Each structure stands twice: as structure tokens, then as C-alpha cells.
Image (tube, grey):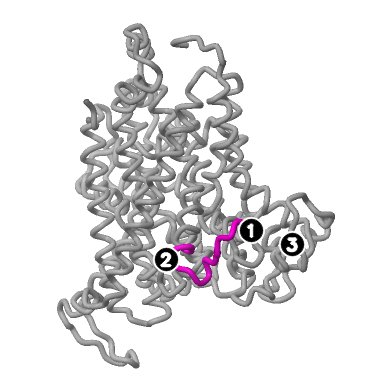
Amino acid sequence: MEKRAVFNNRMLPFALLAPQIVVTLVFFYWPASQAVWQSYLLQDAFGLSTTFVWFENYIELFKQPDYYGTIANTIVFSAAVSAISLSSGLLLAVMADKPLHAAGLYRTLLIWPYAVAPAVAGVLWIFMLHPSLGTIARGLRALGIDWNPLLNGDHAMIMVVLAAAWKQISYNFLFFLAGLAAIPRSIIEAAAIDGARSMRRFWTIVFPLLSPTTFFLLVVNIVYAFFDTFGVIDAMTGGGPSKATEILVYKVYADGRLGGDLGGSAAQSVILMAIVIGLTAVQFRYIERKVTY
Amino acid sequence: MVERKRVGNIVPHAILWIGVAIVAFPVYLAFVGSTHERSIIANGLMPITPGALFFENYFQTIFVGTSGTTREPVGTMIVNSFVMAMVIACGKIAISIISAYAVVYFRFRLRMAAFWVIFVTLMLPVEVRIYPTYKVAADLSLLDTYAGLTVPLIASATATLLFRQFFMTVPDELVEASRIDGAGPFRFFWDTLLPLSRTNMAALFVILFIYGWNQYLWPLLITTRDDMQTIIIGIKKMIVTSDALTEWQLVMCTVMLAMLPPVFVVITMQRLFVRGLIETEK
């Protein structure tokens, strides 16, 4: 789509674009290209000389058993976060979509966690689940469960998943609510007249018609779990215990900072960039086309 | 309503209240924690009702700070966070609205190239280019400055796309009329387009304020001095590895203070917030 009426001015559009383009080039393109370049370089232990090593950093990376562990963590983490937050968001949205007394109040009471920073969500949950002082941890201990996320990797994973999913429920709830509002009432009424009960109507009509929203949210949730949960992990576990909660983004950070392995960290950055590009492409391609029946 | 039920709507109400309770419970406990004594919490004996130290704890948090780790009072961190969130939100809106204006209302060489350059940044979040970006900021001596906290985050493909989308729906007749009246590009932008964009700008502001306030990774890298920390980073630094030293009651006060502004914005500007959220994700 193009505008018919436009201004003719040679320099003005460049001046208007300049701030955005300058920031983009300096802080986005230049560092991204540096990451790609560094991923082909190997620095000696003292940072004095660098050599061009082609794909050695990548090969080294895939030789590390740790890296596969991190990939597995990322898959488990993002699958669990997406599953929990999508299903709770959908359940709550379906309930709030019914003509209820005080439906607006429920919306207000359910959307605010969107505004909580991931790192803060992490601290809220560690305060409840901390083995020595957490209120819920105390309850679990009373039930005879030896809960200790500081030492047990599975417990730590459960803890970060809960915190990350908790924060994302409100987002999914809002989008599902908007998706439900867009489904024509007449279709649902027609099914009701045909004798379909509430559950049946949901699975045969409402859920399929929601599929564009669900698919869109799935991609958004995966992106969230991959990248935006850095704060959750850093505030709660720092990737531990013994890397049980280290996800890909966290490893880029930890390897570059603590390990000082800049080439390896850069190679990981490049792999992550490829993942983002892939996810964005999927999002745009399918959102445009709409997943419908 | 499709069908009338005898039991009424007890089940949906119950499920929604359970949902609300699950969502609110961690925050309630944090509030409780912020009103108790350090030793009660550290010994794992915190009751689930608020204690008596509300004023003492919040006063110490805001004006004095923790005794051990970061000595900076949280008041300073709140100011830093506020400056960061405001500059990022306003900056993103300002530079995006003018770039969208250039792309939609002008014809020039490289127009589409410029659009794509902005668009591709969607695929380059800070998280995937951590150290090279840090190095650029360090080379430009932006460490521990407000400029360093904000400028690298100020480009926005999302906001530019949103304004572009909106400008496309503005009728061409408006530009034509302005031109007949003798208005140039500045006049048209200021007198016609900007007032029309007000709601979009407000909706975007709500989302971007929250985005700026909640930043974590970038301020973590770019700030080393205590007095430049944002509140979100401050919380993390208050939790020390040796648990006995962590002053949890002050951490929880800080957590409550860190949540207050963005949650307040979401609740009071709910309509704009929902609109902003749905528009930016289109």
C-alpha cells in the first residue's frame, strides 16, 4: 500500500530517519557483525593475539557435553513454561469469557503480573521455595518431601519453570480473551441448539477457531522462554546447581563473562541469532496466513 | 448466554478465584516478608500474616539501604529506574514516529532499504549479542551513564511498524487538504498527524515504560557503580550467596517497591495497556 499524496523533499526524510538508523547501526548491526566475526577467531589466554580459525569455535562447542545439556535444559524449560502458562491462560480466559458478574474485576486481578520484571518474579518465587526460609518449602518438608532446589537440579528446574510461567499467564490470558471475544456467538448458539454440551462445544468449535491465537502465543511463549527469562534464571539459580538450569542465553552470558571464552560465546550468540531469525520467520509467515480450519 | 444452568456460575467463579489467588499469593507473601524482622525470616519462621515493622523496614529500604551488600539506598535506585524507563519510552516513541513519518510520507531512494534496516532489528535482541554490544558501549565511554543505560535500547522496530501501520490508515485527503492550505511537512506532522496519533502514543508509552523499568541484562552489564544501579539490579545484588547475610525483609521491601510503578501503570491505564499490548504484537 502506498500513499498517493507525499511530500517532495530530498534531505528531510534522511534527517528524520537518522536517529533511528544511527542507533541501529551502532548498537545492533555493528555488535551483531562483531559476534559473527569473533565466532571465527581464537584468542590466546592473554588476549594478546587472535587467529582466524574458521569453524573451530563451533566444532569445539558441539564437542562439549555441557552444550547438549544446555540445549536439553532449554527444551525442557521452554516446553514446560509454554505448556503451563498457555493452559492456565486458556482455562482462565474461557472462564472469564462467560457472562459473569464482575468479569471486568477478574480481568484486572489477572493481568497485572505482566508488569512484574522476570527477575522480580524469580525473587518472589525463591522467597517461597527457598529450602531454609520459604513458606511453601516448609509445607513441602512437612509433607515429607526433601525439597532442596539449591542442591537438587530437578527441584531447581521446577522452581525456575514455575516463576517463569507465573509471569506469563497474564499475557496468554489477555490474548486468549481477545481471541474468544472474536468468535461469533451465533456459531456457538447453533451448536447449543443442536444439543452439543459445553465441553463438546469447546473442543469442536471454540478451540479450533482459536488456533491462530494459540499458534501465535506458542511462538511468543517460546521466544519468551528462550530470551526474556534471563532475569529469572540469573536471580534464582545463576544456572545452577551444577548447570541444571543453564539455558542457552545464560550460557552465552556465563561463558563470555566468567569463562572469558569470547570465541565460544560469540559462536553461541550466532546460533541464537539463527534461532531468533527462524522463530520470527515462522511467526510472520504463519500469522499472515492465519492458521484456520 | 447460551444455556441457563441451575447451579449458576459457581464453577467459573471458583476457577477464576483460584487463578487470582495463585497469581496474587507470591506477592502477598513478599508483602508479609517486608513487614517482619530479619531473624524471623532467616530462621524460616515467618507467619503468613503481616508483622509490625512496615514503617521501619520501608524507611530503611528507601532512605538508608542495606547494611551489608549494596549500601546505596533504594530511593536512588528508584530514581535511576524511573529516568531509564522514561527516557526509553519517550525516546523510542519519538525516534520511531519520525522514522515512520519519513517512510510513509516521503519518496526517496533507499526508502525500502531504510525500512528493512529497522525491521531486521526485531531479530537481534540484546541477549544474542551481549558482549560485542557491551564493548561498543565501553568504547564510547557510556558505562555508568544514563546515556549508556538508555540509548542502546532506544531503537524500536515494533514502534516504527506500529506507527507506519497507523499512518497508512490516515486518509490521504488530510495531507492533500493541508498542502492546499499551504502547510509543509513540519506543519502537517505537528498539527495533524501528531494529534491523531495521541492514543497510539499513549498505549505504546504504557508498554514501553514497563519494558524500560523491567530491563535486567543490559543495566547489569553497563552499571558498575552502586549509585547508577536500577532497582531491579539492586534486588539481585542484595541477595548474597551466604544466606545468613541476606536481609530478606529489605529485599522484600525492594521487591514491593520495584513492582509498584509498573503494576500501578497497568491497573490504572488498563484500557491503554491492553490496546498497546495487542497493537504492538500485530
The residues bearing labels 2 and 3 have C-alpha atoms spaced at a distance of: 28 Å
Residue B185: which quarter of the image?
top left
Q: How many marks?
A: 3
Q: What amino acid is at disc 1?
A: Ala
Tell me the residue at 28%/91% (across/down): A44
Q: Which residue is at the far left?
A: A54
Residue labelled with disc 1: A142
Residue A36: which quarter of the image?
bottom left
- What chain letter is assigned to the residue under label 1? A
Q: Main secondary structure of the magenta part?
A: loop
CB-based contact (under 8 Å), mark 2 and mark 3: no
| Span colored in magenta | A142-156
Residue labelled with disc 2: A245
Q: What amino acid is at disc 3?
A: Leu
Picture coordinates of residue A6 (x, y %)?
Answer: 27, 32
Mark in the foreground, 1 or 2? 1
The disc label shown at residue A163, or none:
none
Q: What amino acid is at disc 2?
A: Thr
Q: Which residue is at the far front?
A: A144
Residue labelled with disc 3: B45
Question: Is-magenta flag for residue B161?
Answer: no
The foreground one among B142 and B229 is B229
Mark in the foreground, 2 or 3? 3
The residues bearing labels 1 and 2 have C-alpha atoms spaced at a distance of: 26 Å
Q: Would residue B79 be seen by someone viewing this image from the given angle?
A: no
Tell me the residue at 66%/64% (across/down): A133
Question: Height in image: A38 above or below A220?
Answer: below
Picture coordinates of residue B109 (x, y %)?
Answer: 19, 46
Circle 3 SS class: loop
Q: Would residue A288 be seen by someone viewing this image from the given angle?
A: yes
The residues bearing labels 3 and 1 have C-alpha atoms spaced at a distance of: 13 Å
